[in-house]
Image (cartoon, rainbow, N blue to C red):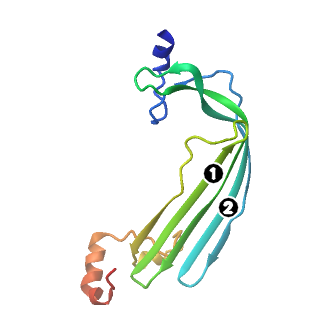
Amino acid sequence: DAWAAVALLHPGLADGRLYWGNVDLDPETAYQVALTGAFSGERWRLVISPFYTHVVDYIQGSEVPGRVDPMTGNPILRWENFSHVNLFGVDAEAGYTINEYVGLRGYLSYVRGYNESTNDDLYRIMPLHGAIALDLLGAEADEPASDYPFKGNMDVERLEKLLAADGNRIPSV
């Protein structure tokens, strides 16, 4: 029908759904509390940041009764305000310099979002995720502007010189 054809004008948010606009939305207002602790030693660093956010008039898609995307069969969503939403979680990052040539770093992030209006979890909240990196270190790791005790941005020419000079002292991982 014509309504579904108009809905096709907004192809969604890469989630395979169609979203119907809403000119009557109120702006979101968020209140956040966060605490960050940074700890470090001679060769290690740890930063932990737990947080809590309360959002009033949170905007999220909700199903339009009786309206289905003719291409996918998914319910069509309409942007709506939800009166009370809570998000809480923690972000953490760590780094460890194994020796003068090798460093390890990583991060971990967790967020939980809960909609008090619908007694349901929020849609499109990333699950627990993180990453680990192994870095080759060089003199640039000592730059005061570095955010980490190592940077891992050594160029190939410099790496070849380092391996030629000290290759037998660099541990294999």
Is residue 134 shown above or below 21? below
> In front: mark 1 or mark 2?
1
Instruction: Determine the CA span between mark 1 and mark 2.
Output: 12 Å
What amino acid type is highlighted by mark number 2? Pro
Quarter of image, res 50: bottom right
Is residue 139 shown above or below 50? below
**Image location of residue 25, percent across then percent down:** 68, 26
**Image location of residue 136, percent across then percent down:** 37, 75
Foreground of the two, 125 or 119: 119
The numbered mark at residue 171 is none
Is residue 5 shown above or below 34? above
Query: Between disc 1 and disc 2, whose residue precedes?
Result: 2
Tell me whether the residue at label 1 lies in contact with that at label 2, contact meaning CB atoms closer than 8 angstroms: no
- Relative to 129, is 30 on the left or the right? right
Residue in the picture at 69% in, 22% down: 24
10 Å crowding of disc 1: few (<14), some (14-19), many (20+): some
**Image location of residue 62, percent across then percent down:** 61, 29
What amino acid type is highlighted by mark number 1? Arg
Quadrant, the C terminus: bottom left
Number of marks drawn: 2
The residue at which mark 1 appears reads as: 112
Foreground of the two, 61 or 43: 61
Quarter of image, res 21: top right
Residue at the top extreme, as displayed: 2
Residue in the picture at 53% in, 68% down: 147
For mark 1, give the secondary structure.
strand
Residue in the picture at 27% in, 82% down: 163
- Relative to 165, is 63 on the left or the right? right
Foreground of the two, 10 or 75: 75
For mark 2, give the secondary structure.
strand
The numbered mark at residue 50 is 2
